[in-house]
Image (spheres, grey):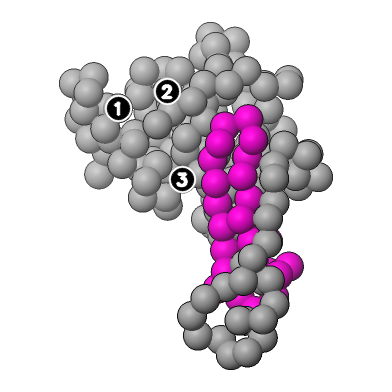
Amino acid sequence: MNLTMTTVAGRHPASISSAELHKQCRITFGRATGPGGQRRNKVETAVRITHLPTGIIAGASERRSQLQNQHTAERRLRLKLARQVRTAVDPRSYQPSERWQRRRQGPKMPVNPKNRDYPALLAEALDVIVAKGFDVGGAAGIGGITMSQLARLIRHDRQAFAMVNDGRTARGLPALK
């Protein structure tokens, strides 16, 4: 499922601040089930976040702290948004975001998938790749990095990597390895 959205100033929902994201979401709390003792069964620590414009839902209940579960659920939501929502990009006039420029080191894009910037960088990369018809080399050139660096960025997320390979295969391009 790929949704295409027109966003304010071309900003992908995975890249906006937590405060802005929360304004677009419904956050509900509930009781978690399973191991964890009495506290887990009596206190509403489970968190479910629904992004209202897209209907995408993420949740977390593995921690005993509601705040920790909320942070985990928000990260999961950002990753789902990065994978499933596309922001329209014109590859002829596209300029990488400030975040992308800040993270890029010459032709390299070093980013740990646990870094808080990762979902936004993944979303930006996928937006450009889709706009370029799944030409990863062409998308990498637009972003000022090498094709192998862009493939590495995507490869950190199995579902995103599978989506790119499915798109490439559907267009008769070889799958990334």
Categorize mark 3 by other alpha carbons within 10 Å: few (<14), some (14-19), many (20+): many
Give the vertical position of 34 relative to 66 (above or below): below
- How far apart, in angstroms, are the residues tagged by discs 3 and 1? 17 Å
- How far apart, in angstroms, are the residues tagged by discs 2 and 1? 8 Å
Mark 2, secondary structure of its residue? helix
Quadrant occupied by the C terminus: top left
Residue found at the very far right of the displayed protein: 19
Asked if labels 3 and 2 touch by Cβ distance under 8 angstroms, the answer is: no
Do we see residue 125 in this rendering? no
From the top left corner, tell me how far across and down residue 158 is, in percent: 36, 50
Q: Nearer the viewer, residue 103 or 29?
A: 29
From the top left corner, tell me how far across and down residue 149 is, in percent: 44, 42
Say the numbered circle drawn on residue 153: 3
Q: Which residue is mark 1?
A: 167
From the top left corner, tell me how far across and down residue 47 is, in percent: 64, 61
Mark 1, secondary structure of its residue? helix
Q: Is residue 64 left or right of residue 110?
A: right
The quadrant in which residue 11 appears is top right
Asked if labels 1 and 2 touch by Cβ distance under 8 angstroms, the answer is: yes
Q: How many marks?
A: 3
Q: Residue at x 69, y 45 (%)?
A: 26
Q: Residue at x 61, y 81 (%)?
A: 41
Q: Amino acid at mark 3?
A: Leu
Magenta segment, which residues? Answer: 47-72
Quadrant occupied by the N terminus: top left
Q: Amino acid at mark 2?
A: Val
